[in-house]
Image (spheres, helix red, strand yellow):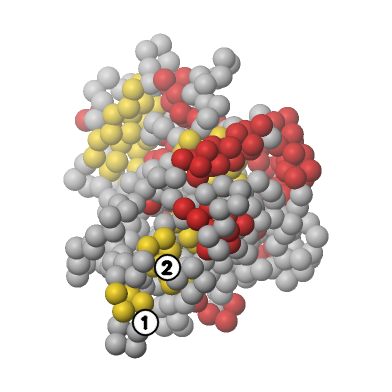
Amino acid sequence: MALLPLLISCLLASAQTADNFYWYKDSVVYQLYVRSFQDTNGDGIGDLKGVIQHADYLKSLGIGAVWLSPIYPSPNYDYGYDIADMENVNPEYGTLEDFNELVKEMKARGIRVIMDFVPNHTSIKHGWFLASEARNDTDEAYSEFYIWKDPSGYDGNNKPLPPNNWLSVMGTGSAWQWSEKRKQFYLHSFLVEQADLNYDNPIVRKKMNNVLKLWMNRGVSGFRMDAVSWIYDDLACGNEPTSDHPNPNNPNDYGNHDQHRFPSRFSDEWVDVLHMMVMTLPGTVLTYNGDEIGLEDAYVRYDEGKDLQGLRAGPSRFAAMSRDFERGPMPWKAAKNGGFSTGRPWLPLAPSLWSRNVENEASEENKRSHLHVYKKLVQLRKTKTMTEGSCLVQTSDEGLLIITRVLRDNPTTLTVLNLGDFEITADLTTFRRSLPSSLGIVVSSYNFPATEK
């Protein structure tokens, strides 16, 4: 089994600071899906005050930044990734005052705030799109804010045909949608409710730059860029080559809001292994909220589903296409709704909430829990060996993965991972001859019978 660390795309505009040069380089970024983190008003939806409520918990993790899933006003066809107003906060999550308080509370605890930024498209409910569809050029050239094209022709029923054969990446058919109002097609690389912006238009580029500056002035430290691969399109709009091969599904993503949680994809025994691997390799680490406790997928029936990608695929393909499972609410304690909400949660929680919750994982009696392992690994990442040392990755035929981090005049750190199916006894000096005869264990997985020092 090949395991690869997750690659993320981040733009951190304030990365260079006098006291922490390129702070994100070796930082741990905690992806926080606000809607499922903590509800404070009983409506079943997580909110900004819920994030503030758990500010001390976030500090206890040792993370360097929180990446907030989209909190902008949205009709929620794609739950925040279809933005109707890039400059404000969705009332479901709170107010700008709540956001300002969140930034203040995070900063007081040494945690930076990263916003999820969606440059490729907006909601079709956005004022820009409404003006563009109406060809409203009263203020600025909104008619060219999006990618509009005439039909390639008409079928026998005089129905307009799309400009080309481009398909939506959401698996919903053509990437073109006819506007009866404008009498043209608009491009939507994702859902039909998400219209692609036209970056050949300099006014679009200026507008988006202004959005970034606005949030930077509100105190954010940077942005996670979503769907950047689709920003620029060949406006000549030629057909794509056809293929019998579907888009590959990479099962080795570490964890995020678009992939089933890794304990559900692999098993609970892989939780500590994956954390150890990613935490001891160089580079930025991303943790999706709940990964630190080994949270599993929620169980969501088709009639409980919210994700249109899954619902539009139909009942037979819902489990394969829906992203609802990995977006289930965070379980804080062994109680009704896991302590997430006093109301009906917007999605069901994972069935394991009664045992796999933050309170239980954090208890002093549960020192070998996934959460305790995770916290030790975050602290280990902050050592000079990890932030400045060299890195050597080695493997064995038996299924061992060895990560060696070395920095002169500092302790050498070895990560020894068994990726096989059976117990392995290995002589580590075959991987590094200069090792002493006795080694100390800093942290071990919950199923490894050893004493840590």
Circle 2: element type: strand
Q: Nearer the viewer, residue 382 or 141?
A: 141
x, y percent for residue 447:
46, 50
**Label 2 neighbour load within 10 Å: few <14, some 14-19, many 20+:** some
x, y percent for residue 212:
57, 37
Visible in this render: residue 330? Answer: no
**Label 1 neighbour load within 10 Å: few <14, some 14-19, many 20+:** few
Q: Residue at x 25, y 35 (%)?
A: 394
Q: Residue at x 76, y 49 (%)?
A: 95
Q: Residue at x 40, y 45 (%)?
A: 200
Q: Residue at x 74, y 34 (%)?
A: 104
Q: Earlier in the sequence, mark 1 or mark 2?
A: 1
Q: Which residue is mark 1?
A: 159
Visible in this render: residue 26? Answer: yes
Q: Which mark is residue 184?
A: 2
Q: Nearer the viewer, residue 206 or 42?
A: 206
Q: Amino acid at mark 1?
A: Lys
Q: Amino acid at mark 2?
A: Gln
Decide if residue 253 is on the left or right side of residue 381: left
Circle 1: element type: loop
